[in-house]
Image (spheres, helix red, strand yellow):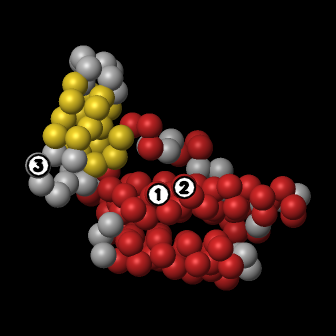
Amino acid sequence: MHLFLKAGERLYLNSALLRVDRKVNIELLNDVTFLLEAHVLRDDEATTPLRQLYYVVQTMMINASAEAEAKSLFGSMLLSMLAEYSNLDIRSGLKKVHEKVLVGRLFDALKLIRDMYSIEEQIFAADGALPAMKRQMR
């Protein structure tokens, strides 16, 4: 896999944070866990249930010392979300996210969650409010 980073960009690589001082091309020659800075969600950006779930999965990837706690939180959040959401696309997507997390494909899980953001936004726009669980998880 080839990564192209601009000067000053950061990369989370196997729980280590790297920053490059100049434009650089990196070729990853083995299976590693990485997350580009552009895909990192800050805690203050976790404003919806799906974004909060994303933040928890992201924590599993970039903070090895918090991985066990994050996995536990992921499980409880997933159950709450499956109980709260009736939208079949969201429910199906959450089940796929769970499968990816179970096999350690966290980057793939993050991508699936990001793909559901627009569906969640449509649900909130139609309902006029966030689900009760959003208020509980903040």
Q: In the rendering, which numbered label is found on residue 111?
A: 1
Image coordinates for residue 77, horizontal then vertical, percent: 55, 72
Against 58, is 68 above or below? below
Q: Secondary structure at mark 3?
A: loop
Image coordinates for residue 2, horizontal then vertical, percent: 23, 41
Q: Badges 1 and 2: C-beta atoms under 8 Å apart?
A: yes
Toward the left, the furthest residue is: 29
Asked if residue 101 can be seen in this view, the reply is: yes
Residue mark closest to the camera, 2 vs 3: 3
* Disc 3: which residue: 29
| Label 3 – label 1 distance at C-alpha | 22 Å
The quarter holding residue 130 reads bottom right
- Looking at the image, tell me whether mark 2 or mark 3 is earlier in sequence order: 3
Q: In the rendering, which numbered label is found on residue 114?
A: 2
Image coordinates for residue 50, horizontal then vertical, percent: 60, 61
The quarter holding residue 110 reads bottom left
Report the side of 22 relative to 84 (left or right): left
Q: Secondary structure at mark 1?
A: helix
Which residue is depicted at the point 78% across and 58% down?
Answer: 122
Which residue is depicted at the point 49% across and 44% down?
Answer: 41
Identified by mark 1, the residue type is Lys
Residues 73 and 120: in front is 120
Against 57, is 63 above or below? above
Identified by mark 2, the residue type is Arg
- Looking at the image, tell me whether mark 3 or mark 1 is earlier in sequence order: 3
State how many labels appear. Answer: 3
Report the side of 31 relative to 68 (left or right): left
